[in-house]
Image (tube, grey):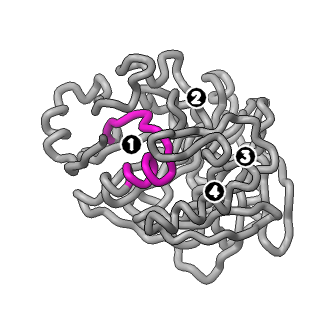
Amino acid sequence: MARISGYHHLTLSTDSAQDDFDFYTKALGLHSVKRTVLFDGVIPVYHLYYGSPNGDASTIITTFPFRKPGVYGRRGSNQSRTIMQSIPKGAADFWVDRLNARGIEAIKITRFGADRAAFAHPCGIPHELVESDRDPRAPITNEAQGIGKAHGIKGIYGAVVAVMDRTAMDDFLTIALPLEKEADDHEGLVFRVPDATGVAQRVEVIVDRDSPQGTWTLAGGTIHHLALNTGDEENQLKLRAHIEGLGFTDISEQKDRNYFKSCYVRSPGGALFEIAWTTPEGWAKDEPPGQIGKTLVFPPWFKDRESELQAGLEEADFA
């Protein structure tokens, strides 16, 4: 059976590139890992990556800011709803205070027994910083932003998916991927993402039959996909064959994302999942190690479009 080891990254479509950059690097203290453009379609849109200084897998959040083209979606059911990141035990109060002081409304909540700081991205996408019960990763520190080891984000905790039919999603997550069901109660379902390093990462599923169907296209204000890490190509292609063999024949062919390679499949609960692995060159393919995320870079196949794409991008200060 093909293996998964944790998350690879989470991707959402946002609004303003400037608000997005300031939110992740200044409010949350993540580091810029890569600044490039959307590889699909023809619209000039940034693709921004944030995470640990070296861009370790399972720390990466990526965004497509859609303010300049003005493409927006609808948050609803049958769609990924909330981005969740892991923090040290006891750190939720620090984050609630910090975010409120910066004008980002935040509250402390508890779900599935875990305390969380709940707030929203400037474009409205819900975020949670979850006090993880088991996470050996070192916190991401950012001295310039006043974030030390006691409170720093450790990486991805997971995502919440809202569904109208929990049974179909349960089957997909436990049979197709497969994940391990940890909880099933009045709050919803929790599935553990296997991770060889022992990091607790999860998919939480809640039932929402009242909200309208959420947007599935690339559109501002919505989460686009949740990427799981297969570690290498062999595991990726084995898992792809397994998923397709179950009848999920809409799973994509492998796509070259320059720094990693990906396949995508739409779950019955609406959330789009990606299975991905990082290439040997990784983030240092087009920027020197230790200097990743400092410049705007384009993939080789966009060489003849660089001027056009750059001219069409939203102006923003990434300092």
Seen at 82% across and 63% down, the residue is: 113
The magenta segment:
20-37
- Marks 4 and 1 in Cβ contact (< 8 Å): no
Residue 250: image x %, image y %? 55, 47
Q: Which mark is residue 277?
A: 2
Could one spot residue 165 in this view of the protein?
Answer: no
Alpha carbon distance from label 4 to label 2: 25 Å
Callout 2 secondary element: strand
Alpha carbon distance from label 3 to label 4: 13 Å
Where does the N terminus fall, quadrant-wise? Answer: top right
Seen at 49% across and 66% down, the residue is: 101
Callout 1 secondary element: strand
**Image position of 169 with respect to 192: above or below:** below
Q: Is residue 68 magenta?
A: no
**Image position of 275 with respect to 24: above or below:** above
**Left or right, residue 202 beside residue 106:** right
Q: Amino acid at mark 4?
A: Leu
